[in-house]
Amino acid sequence: MMPGNEVALGADSKARTQQRLTVLVIAGLAWSLVNFRLDLMRRMIANGHRVLAAAPDFDTETETALRAVGIEPLTVPMQRTGLNPVNDLQTLRALRKLIRDRRPDRILPYTMKPIVWGSLAARLEGNIRCHPLFTGLGYAFSEAHPTGKRRLIRRIAIGLHRHALGMIQLGFYYNDADLADLRRFGMIPDSARMVPVPGSGADTERFAPAPLPDGVPVFLFVARMLRSKGLEDLIEAARALRREGREFRLDLLGPTDSNPDAIDTETLRAWNDAGDAIWRGATRDVRPYLAAAHVLVLPTRLREGVPRTILEAMSSGRAVITTDAPGCGETVGDGEGGLVVPMGDVGALAAAMRRFLDHPELAARMGAQARARVCKRNDVHLVNRLLLTEMGLEGDAPSVLTPDLPPASVVAA
């Protein structure tokens, strides 16, 4: 039995005796409700609660997956990126109407726009208990001293958060750097209690260890196709290794994006044609690609929260190369679940990749350590229990993680 399964869906008898509550989960992307929050919402239902899931752009597959487990999908207009006052006011109005009509007892928004407009709607409709989940502060906070457009966006984001979150009493965050900025810029009330959460968690049964494949070593990058994810650094490192005559394959898995930081499809195709990397496009099931790879590489230059791709790779028994960006290096543990390099250091990135090419046994050894590490610290059942107990949706629990699941701030200390 994996860690946390003893408190898996419906297993806590105290939870089933609680009052039935209505919970509204708000996302900026409908599919993320299935990809990142399905286990959490299923556990809410197993504990006797009613669950509403709001997001833009539902497709049939997503709606079907949610309804199959008793979750009601609700479409709200929302542009995931960009600042457009007309569109954002439409989002606010739609969320206010939804809250007014459905009167949820708890609201759990995650990512920036759902947090801002969901929290503001909850405040305007009678201070419904809203518990924002900060999975990362994103583009506006990716540089310590932004200039130009990024600086303007940060100022706007700070003002919106201050206005929207002025009454929250409880929230969640993934890494200490995000909490520091939330406090530093006054984006949350001084009185708000903020609870550390070690990411969205990995389903350690679904992402079971897979044997390493035979053949040429395969490095796998899984993320949106963004410069800030370190993609250009990765391509340069791969080119340097190929100039040395090294043989390996580099797979890029993930969608393009509307983010101003996105790498265009022409560039991705050019990399493909030049033999730098193979762009595999987007997928809704990363497991076959992890099984076909030896090492996951995420050379991000961003504060990442706690990347789900890293957790799922570690759970699958894959070593990870990543940077010392907050949320990444401490999750992996340098020399334990993989290798950690400085952000933006192409030479160090190439050297880390070279170590796995020169010492093939490292992938197996560090992959096994990665699996043990994520099972102990990031199992999805433990993470979900923390969230639900703190929100009053499950039986009594302390306001810190169990000894087997230390807070994000001390993971890999």
Image (cartoon, rainbow, N blue to C red):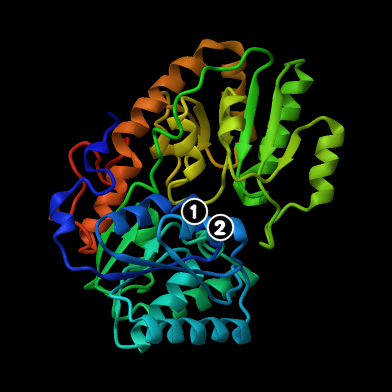
Which residue is at 63% across, 81% downward? Answer: 84
Place residue 136 in its image quadrant. bottom left
- Is residue 141 in view from this perspective? yes
The residue drawn where x is 43% and y is 53% is 38
Q: Are marks 2 and 1 in contact (CB under 8 Å)?
A: yes
Whether residue 46 is situated above or below residue 249 in the rendered picture? below
Q: Which residue is mark 2?
A: 62
Foreground pick, 23 / 188 = 23
Quadrant in the picture for residue 125:
bottom left
Query: How far apart are the alpha carbons under marks 2 and 1?
Result: 7 Å
In the rendered image, residue 314, in percent from the top left (x then y), is placed at 45, 31
On-image quarter of the N terminus = top left
Q: Residue at x 73, y 16 (%)?
A: 247
Q: Is residue 85 above or below residue 129?
A: below
Check disc 2: other Cα within 10 Å, few if <14, some if 14-19, many if 20+. some
Q: Secondary structure at mark 2?
A: helix
Element marked by disc 1: helix
| Relative image position of residue 363 (x, y in whole percent) | 52, 18
Q: Horizontal and vertical percent for residue 157? A: 50, 74
- The residue to which callout 1 is attached is 34
- When the figure is inspected, residue 364 is found, relative to residue 102, above or below; the finding is above
Type of amino acid at the residue the image marks with label 2: Thr
